[in-house]
Each structure stands twice: as C-alpha cells, then as structure tokens.
Image (spheres, rainbow, N blue to C red):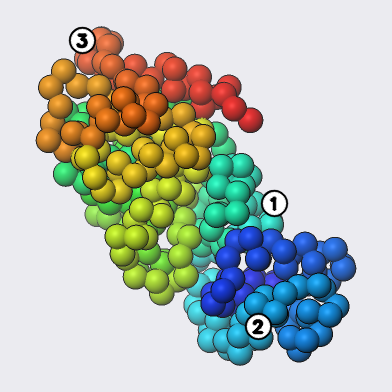
Amino acid sequence: MSDAKYWIALDQAQGMGPANLKLVHEAVAGAGLSLRDLFDLKPAEIQREFSLNEKIAGAVEAARNSLSRIENDYFALVESGFEAVLFFEDSYPERLHETMGNTIPPVLYVHGNREIMKARGAAVLGDMHVSEKGRLVAFTAARILASHRIPVISGLARGVDLVAHQSALESGGTTVAVLPYGVNHLKLPEALKPVYDETRMLLVSPFYPNREYSVFNSYARNRIAVGLSRAAFIVEAPLDGGVFEAGKSAKNLGVPLYVTEYGKYPDNASGNPKLVAEFGGVPVRGRMEKDLLVPNLDRLIGDVKFGGQ
C-alpha cells in the first residue's frame, strides 16, 4: 500500500504544517526510508535518529494514534474515485511550490485528469453575483483561453466560476476547479453536467475529505487557484471579500494580475479600480471582433505562455 494514508494522518496532526512536513520528508528520504518506518518509532527515537524536534516527534505519535480513522477515510476516498497527491510527488504541481513555498497545501485530493494542473493555466475569478456584462466577459475570456489551449482555473461557485468552466468546456478546452471544502461535500453543479468531461476537467480540494465549507476556506481556495496559475484575471470584484483578496494574493505570490476595466463599473466590480491602482492589476479593455466586444487578453496570454519560470 502507498504511504499516502501516513502522510494524510501526519498532515492532520496538530502542530504540523507544510514546513514541518517538508523536514520530515527530507529526513526519511535522506535515510532511504518511508514515513511508515517513522511510525514504528517512539518520539524519543524519532528525535534521536532523525534530528527532528519534539513537536514533530509528538505529531508523529498523534498521527499514529489516528491512523485507523484516517485509513477508513482514505479507503472511502479511493472508492469515490478521488486520489491523494502528496507535496513531494512528481504529479504535484511544481507551480504551487514556486508561488506558495512553505504555505502550499501538502495534500491535494483530486479527481479527473491530473496533468491539467501541471499545464500553464490562467485563473478566471469573479463575484458570485456577476453582472450581465461580467458574465459575458467571463464567457468570452474562457472561450479565448480554450482556443489557445490554456487551462481555465477557477472555483466551483455560481457566477463567474461556473460561467468560465462551462464556456471553456463547451469550447473544447480544459479546466481546474478548486473546491472550498472536502470532497465528501462535492455536488457537481447542474449547469456543468451536460459538458462535464473528466478527461478535460480536474476537481481539486486542498482540504481533508470531510471538511465543511467556510468563508476562510473560500479565501484559501482562491489563493490556491491564483497560485496554480501563470496569470490571474479578475472579472468582477467587490471592494471586500474573497475575490478582492484573490487579486491581492496575485501580487503577493508574484502572479501577473489582470482586471476588467469598465466604462461604468457594476456594483459588484467596485473593487476593480482599486486592484489596478493599488495592487498592480493590468486593465483589460474590450475590442471588437466580428461585431462582438470581447476582452483583449493578448498580454495575459503572453504572460501565461512565455512569462516567468
């Protein structure tokens, strides 16, 4: 059996985090061992043999005590069609290591084509209560990205998220949906069922399978979506809330930020000018194509395909 259940148990132990998990991986890999070998040792032995601190040794003991419960949850996860991708595995997206460093989610629970999250994608994010103008912007933006074979990365909420996924999939593109809850709470939205294709869409949760939705989770979800991307496009953002914070995250994570510019801003896009003025967002203006006004994403597409690392 893989070591996944051991790493999941350790990830859930109090006091552990990405930085400490990386230390543990370096210690066991350097010794040519696996994490399950560490679970056979007492805390004092872990400290002595691997030079790991008391906090980590205690977390390993706590993880060992929870292993039976974790194992049951892990088997249920696998039976549901999801997989656990660990932070040190080749299939874990290197992009998250680049942008998030020691704040990465150590375990990603995924269903679908995991190769999509390793491609150079663009986040398309916006308010749930998107205006009709914003809905059109999100729809055409996702279609344009799909035509350039750029995966669309978003959440799975109504509004901009669903519009972007639906448009990209209808156009033959690929998408990544980052969830703000554990996979046990997933219900595929009705709007996506006609176009859903697990070979072209990846569902990703950074949370333990039974974790419920919370506002904090939605903020973390948006930050991870931005961290996965090579550029982030904010369609509409109120002055506060998760979408505005996603725009701020782009600046903090070193991800190029693009923001819709309106002649007259809808109520739910009141944060757009501030993201441009204070957080380095590049205004996305419209241009005419075949008598249709569409967002000009040329610069964003260049950043996704050729910019950065």
Q: Which residue is mark 2?
A: 58
Badge 2: residue crowd in 10 Å (few <14, some 14–19, many ≥20) = many
- At horizontal 20% and vertical 10% (from top left) the residue drawn is 291
Image quarter (top left, top right, bottom left or bottom right) of the N terminus: bottom right
**Is 120 or 219 nearer to us in this picture?**
219
The image quadrant of residue 21 is bottom right
Can residue 297 be seen from the camera position used here?
Answer: yes
- At horizontal 48% and vertical 60% (from top left) the residue drawn is 206
Query: Which disc is residue 70 wearing?
Result: none
Query: Which disc is residue 90 wearing?
Result: 1
Q: Position of residue 36 (x, y in %)?
A: 74, 78
Q: Position of residue 196 (x, y in %)?
A: 37, 49
Count how many numbered circles sit on residues in the image.
3
Give the alpha-carbon distance from disc 2 to disc 1, as whole Å: 29 Å
- At horizontal 32% and vertical 65% (from top left) the residue drawn is 213
Q: Secondary structure at mark 2?
A: helix
- Left or right, 68 with respect to 54, comes to left
Q: Secondary structure at mark 3?
A: loop
Q: Are marks 2 and 3 in contact (CB under 8 Å)?
A: no
Residue type at the position of mark 3: Asp
User: 239 above or below 10?
Assistant: above
